[in-house]
Image (cartoon, rainbow, N blue to C red):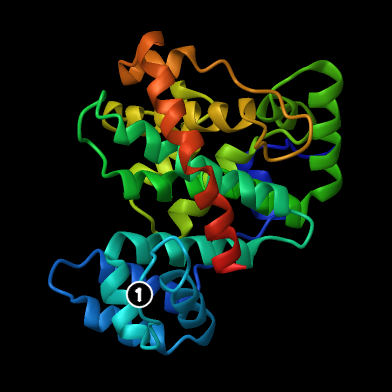
Amino acid sequence: MSAPRNIDYLLEEIITLPSLPATVARILELLNDPDSSLSEVGKIVSGDPAIALKTLRLVNSAAYGLRGRVTSVEHAVTLLGAKVIQNLVLTATVLDTLSSGARLLFQHSIAAGVAARSIMRSHIFGNVLDPEEAFAYGLLHDIGKIILEDYMSDELVQAEDLSRVQGLPGHVAEREVIGVDHAEIGGRLAMNWRLPDSIAAAIMAHHDLARCKDDEYLPYAAMLNAADTICVAAGLPSYEGAVADDANGAWQVLGITSPQIPAILDDFFASIPEVEELTEAVS
């Protein structure tokens, strides 16, 4: 090969990072603006038929158990609240970005959001991140795999085969075959989408905590590392036969000890039906 397969080469010669859809960008902008209202968000959501339909399906799902059927999108947005709408919009965006063969990856992404939420619900690490915000981090953590699926699918399959044959974590095999891993690609995509620096840094470093150059963001990367490991160990991997990371370093960063982990796992397993519920709502 004439050029090194580093991140800059791939982004210049092979991969084109997609832009965040304009409607989604506007919704996220409003949700992060303290001066905006859910009414304004509701109007934007109402103007996008696909997101509006997903919003109504979610608010009327069994997970919310409302007595009467909600037919107004703006009312649905108010009932669901800002954090849930943010998660819904990001989930729909991830789904729309996926290729048709990546359903296992989509399920893994939602499961990682649930696992990240369970970690933050434990309050062992304190209240540095709202559990619903943690869900969004988990949901987006493997978005770089979507890009590799779209642009380098054959090589990604080779990396997954290498992972299975040699018992390597997927990100290690990706670096062997492709030259970079999905975390690095995903971090660049998060920056391209102008997501918060904490999310971009966490995605970038979730398989290699040493990549986190800002100690402020290190706990978020550790949370994603632990959440990803929980999902793979629980049989919810991003691809068949995936090998889990050793999350000991992540638990240490989070200050979570072995006796405290079972409570987190209990919360995660109790929440697994929500993975199916959300998958159905946005599909």
Residue most extreme to the front: 67
Residue 60: x %, y % from top left: 44, 74
Quadrant position of residue 126: top left
Q: Residue at x 37, y 84 (%)?
A: 73
Residue type at mark 1?
Arg
Above/below status of 59 relative to 131? below
The answer to which of 167 and 189 lies nearer the viewer is 167
Above/below status of 106 relative to 262? below
Placement of the N terminus among the 4 image quadrants:
top right
Placement of the C terminus among the 4 image quadrants:
bottom right
Q: 101 left or right of 133?
A: right
Q: Residue at x 41, y 59 (%)?
A: 87
Residue most extreme to the top: 258
Above/below status of 172 relative to 195? above
In the structure shown, which secondary structural element does the residue marked by tag 1 occupy? loop
The answer to which of 244 and 218 lies nearer the viewer is 244
Please indicate, yes or no, whether residue 274 appears anywhere in the rendered image. Answer: yes
Residue 189: x %, y % from top left: 52, 53
Quadrant position of residue 207: top right
Q: 176 left or right of 132?
A: right
Q: 54 left or right of 159?
A: left
Residue 178: x %, y % from top left: 76, 36
Bin the neighbour count of mark 1 within 10 Å (Cα to Cα): few under 14, some 14-19, many 20 and up: few
Residue 185: x %, y % from top left: 59, 45
Tally of numbered discs: 1
Residue labelled with disc 1: 67
